Image (spheres, grey):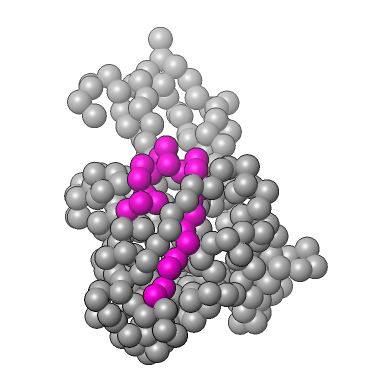
Amino acid sequence: RASDDVALKSYDLRSWRFIALNTEKGPLKDAKVRQAVNATIDRTELRKVTFGAEANGQNSPCEFVSGPFVGSSPYYNRSVKVTETADKALATQMMKEAGANESAGRWILNGEGITLRIGMNSVLDAEAKDLLNQIGNQLSEGGFDRQVHKVPNSDWVQKAITGRLSDQFDALIGKWSFGVVEEVNAQFHTRGDGKGTLNIFNYSNPTVDGLISQYDEAKTDTEAQDAYHELHAFLAKDLPYIFLWKLDTKSAWRNEVRNNQIAPYYYFTEIDSWNVDG
């Protein structure tokens, strides 16, 4: 930033971070408990301890998202607001509506404390240092017991995204990256008949399946956007995922390099147009 010979350029990798929640078994099967967990997560504090970014600071390294698209996407529903900070009152309300009681700062449901087993794709630790522990700490402070584990990348690829870790975890932290088309059908459609191939916890909801069908059958861009806008809004309420943020990425360029266009998914896709002065 301080150099006169170098310019910084932002580019969008079209990737976002999430916490997938196990909606099929365990305490998170109840949507009210999922809503309480979401209200317990303080994204602003996570961003601060993970990236050193202050609230409302300039040049923040990441942008919060409320659904399964980056903010620049035509599918992003801007009417769905991001929950940037924790809301203890809402979390308490949701847990009590779920039938839980608070005892000595811990939530008790059906006579037992709630222990959440949380895993994170190990490769994310390099780009979001200590994110796993920080999320665990926030949940612990919010009354949930937690066990945290790093999932080897081979297990993530072979087991997590194929829905084979449902018996081992209540939540999994990861990221998705997209190309030009940001389709999320594989992440949220009911698994089966070649669909839902990336459905981490085998989430299944007929409303979601219907909206994905509307997207698939759309004849115009507007119809496709309307279907995905509705999907975004529904997922923000049903919470098979807690949506965190997408990273704002920057590259440093010598001023002599001209006409450089950075492709969002494959960095050097449009290199043919670049040239160097002198």
Frontmost residue, 202 versus 224 = 202
Q: Position of residue 258 (x, y in %)?
A: 42, 24
Residue found 32% across the figure and 32% down from its top: 8
- Considering every residue shown, the one lying at the far front of the view is 111
Whether residue 231 appears in this view of the structure is: no
- Considering every residue shown, the one lying at the far top of the view is 278
Residue 55 lies, with reference to residue 278, above or below; the image says below
Residue 163, located in which quarter of the rendered image?
A: bottom right
Frontmost residue, 125 versus 127 = 125
Residue found 19% across the figure and 55% down from its top: 56
State which region is magenta.
113-134
Count of numbered labels shown in the rendering = 0
Q: Quadrant of the C terminus?
A: top left
Whether residue 58 appears in this view of the structure is: yes
- Residue 214 is left or right of residue 194, and the answer is left
Q: Position of residue 39 (x, y in %)?
A: 33, 72
Residue found 39% across the figure and 47% down from its top: 247
Residue 123, magenta (yes or no): yes
Residue 82, magenta (yes or no): no
- Residue 24 is left or right of residue 229, and the answer is right
Q: Position of residue 120 (x, y in %)?
A: 48, 51
Residue found 36% across the figure and 58% down from its top: 136
